[in-house]
Image (cartoon, rainbow, N blue to C red):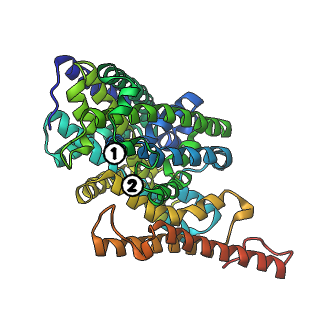
Amino acid sequence: MTAHFAAIDIVLLAAYFGVTLVVGFWKRQRNTDDYLIADRQLGLPVFVATLVATWYGGILAVGEFTYESGLANWTTQALPYYLFAILFALFLAPRVRSASLYTIPDKLAQEYDRKTALLGSLLAFVLASPAPYILMVGQLLAVAFGWPLVPAMVVGTLFSIVYVYVGGFQSDVRINVFQFCLMFAGFASALWVVASGAGGFHWLAAHLPKDHLRLDGGLGAPYILVWFFIAFWTLVDPGFHQRCYAAKSPAVARNGILIAVLCWAVFDFLTTSTGLYAKAIMPNLAPGTEGMAYPLLAERMLPAGVKGLFYVAMLATVMSTLVSYTFLAAMTIGRDLVWRLRGEVGNANVPLYTRWGMVAAAMLGIIGSALLPSAVSQWYTIGTVCVPGLLFPVVTGYVARWKVSAGFAFGSMLAGTGISLGWLSAGWIRHGVSPTAIYPLELQPMYPGLLAAALVYLAGRISRRAHRFVHPGGASDEPA
């Protein structure tokens, strides 16, 4: 499909792109800390805005999931992340900020050793992959301007990263504040117009399939449960950690995340309600077009002006995450791989390496999106493989009494990732890359991965206790 815009819609889109470039390139003299973490000076309002905008990028996938499964979208893509974000705020955020580091692998290097940090760098890079958001920004631009998908992905990616390439995290944060406002304005306006034109929530309930109003969407508890495990992602998400490192204080990090949860809840209400209206108004979309539920609803229901604002909101939602995750992946390449492998001491060259990393991350994201053109499948795959490996070493690294030795931390990381990847590959080899793939023992791959990582970690705890028993006055961080 190709959108049909009135003059006012085109003006709004042009204004969005123009203001984004102006704000993004508005820069001042910077040092390395400015470029990487905004000199650790994010105040509460800005911290909340950048975190909310960054963490909510999969807008077309939200529309698709809601159209197909109703409230299951909220149960799987919202509720688990609220819970883990609150846990992160209460128990990890102040510790992360007090560490005053740059990245997750920095913490792994500080608490364990170089090889653990390097393996963590690879996993953090995959976890910060911008591929799902490159795909969605390409889809939106393809619909808006009638372009082929791959060129649309390239143009959307270049536009999204050009200013952060120059200005770094400072530019990212400034644009996030602008995009935060547009996200809420666009979806609130669209929902108001659609609900006024179609009918209130009683009308909506009467025109939806019954399963769409069930919390599991008819998908069953086992499928819902695996998303709660995938939501462990929150505890090891590079974006959460980076923004906590950039906060003015531990209190800003903690309180900012709690306020962000409230903002996400409001935005989820707007997006989920809009998706439910799309299903009620257009119940029989052609197979394969469900991912265009929001744009198709806009074509059918939104007047000039509101349609343009709605497209701006969708673009802002996706681009805010695309640019942030591209920068995070670039930092991982620049600081955690190139800088660490070169054995440099100072950070003077890190911005240059990060710029190289930005080009590499963007290219790999475009290739990944072309190979696996489903954002939900990308999220599932990335979370399934990376979260079991990172979870125990990262979280316990911030709590001294929970730590294990470097050898066991590396082993836990390797076991969690290796078992999950092997389990996932076994299902894909037999059934193809599909959400309906049947895995060995009919277990979702994340479960055996987490179990393997936990067993290695527990072995490390037992080894540490045994060492303390044999050497009660000795060092607490003995080698494995």
Label 1–label 2 contact, CB within 8 A: yes
Marking on residue 379: 2
Residue 306: quarter of image: top left
Amino acid residing under circle 2: Trp
Q: Nearer the viewer, residue 220 or 120?
A: 220
Q: Nearer the viewer, residue 455 or 364?
A: 455
Instruction: Report whether 299 appears left or right of 422.
Output: left
Q: Is residue 77 left or right of residue 293?
A: right
Q: Is residue 8 visible?
A: yes
Q: Residues within 10 Å of mark 2 (few under 14, many from 20)?
A: some
Q: Is residue 149 above or below residue 430?
A: above
- Residue displayed at 32% across by 34% down: 207
Residue at x-position 65% and y-position 60%: 397
163 or 198, nearer to the observer = 198
Residue 186 at x, y percent in the picture? 35, 25
User: How far across and down, in percent of the image, does residue 173 sit?
Assistant: 46, 34
Mark 1 lies on residue: 61
Report the amino acid beneath label 1.
Ala
- Quarter holding the C terminus is bottom right
Residue at figure coordinates x 66%, y 77% from the top left: 459
Q: Earlier in the sequence, mark 1 or mark 2?
A: 1
> SS class of the residue under badge 2?
helix
User: Quick check: can you spot residue 122?
Assistant: no
Is residue 456 depicted above or below 334 in this figure? below
